[in-house]
Amino acid sequence: MRDMKNHSPNTPAPVDNGLPTKVSFAQVDEDQAGQRLDNFLMARLKGVPKSKVYNIIRKGEVRVNKGRAKPDYKIALGDEIRIPPVRVAEKEPLAKPSNMMTKLLEQSIVFENEGLLVINKPAGLAVHGGSGVSLGLIETLRQMRPDARYLELVHRLDRDTSGCIMVAKKRSMLRHLQAALREKNNSGIRKIYQALVIGDWPKNCRHVDAPLLKTEVVNDERIVRVHVDGKPSLTEFKVLKNFNNCTLVEARPITGRTHQIRVHAKHVGHSLVGDEKYGDDVFNASMRGLGAKRLFLHAAELGFYLPDAKELTIVQAPLATDLANVLQKLTPANL
């Protein structure tokens, strides 16, 4: 007989958080092989505190091929992993993306194959949730594709920056592209941005080579500045078009430092239009009437080598409509 005390009509149904409520077993496939046991478990037990994951490993509740294993054990193809029941406090249901957002992202796919997705990210959308953001790009994509086994960001873009961003659909692709990003001078992946800077960019300024130091201030806000103690940083610049009081430039970061393009542009006296952190507040205010209401920075192109490919794959994202509209309102310079 049903227990009416515990199952009254007004009692909400328990939230299914996808965590195992009884012992389960997972067999390691080719795409999962090679990663640490703790990382494998944290990916499967999303929402479980890291301390809890290490606790169940330490207590021997997690078994690999029926034996104990340490957190740093590298799982291998065919390994059978025993995962114990895990209980965590129920969380608020994840926010749902709007139909408008899901439609926009579907239309913003500029490249896709079996292992990789490249999105022309809209400005204003954070790449992931947190710090007051309930739903970012990666969480939205996972809800749009509930059957996808794996979706992870390869790299990041600032919230106000639009353009090309890579999302791996396989762990092997993530490893491949992140290894490419770590290559010296960012030679494994080519990133090209378009930016509108204040003033006339010097024709002879094709490289900015200045070390960047990252610090944190109130509320975990990151501030980057040129400093002798910073990390070596190099950006290539090329003038695309001159306007009265502004210059459209192409920027290629050779190194991959936080806010690199923005800080290097400021270093040579030509901050980006709409940059509220490193820019000119008075000039930015004067540009809002022309529609420049956010950072004028767009990730226009990505070049990368797919696994086993000899030719560079080039993916481009057209300039965001709001930025293109600003350019149309500017007066070309008489050179």
Image: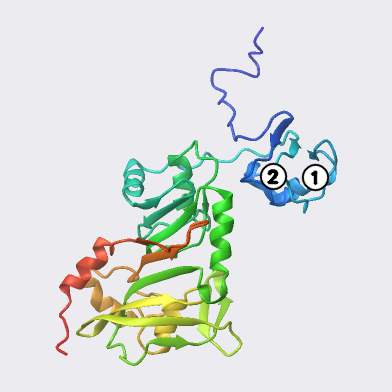
Q: In this view, does 112 lie to the left or right of 94?
A: left
The circle on residue 41 is 2
- Dot 2 falls on a residue whose secondary structure is helix
| The N terminus sits in image quarter | top right
Q: Position of residue 115 (x, y in %)?
A: 49, 48
Can the viewer see residue 136 in this picture?
no
Identified by mark 2, the residue type is Leu
Report crowding for label 1: few under 14, some 14 to 19, many 20 or more residues within 10 A (C-alpha).
many
**Which label's residue is closer to the chain start, 1 or 2?**
2
The circle on residue 93 is none
The circle on residue 57 is 1
Q: Are marks 1 and 2 in contact (CB under 8 Å)?
A: yes
Identified by mark 1, the residue type is Ile
Q: Give residue 28's quadrant in the image.
A: top right
Report crowding for label 2: few under 14, some 14 to 19, many 20 or more residues within 10 A (C-alpha).
some
| The C terminus sits in image quarter | bottom left
Q: Give residue 236's quadrant in the image.
A: bottom left
Asked if 329 appears above or below 271 in the picture, the reply is above
C-alpha separation, residue under disc 1 versus residue under disc 2: 10 Å
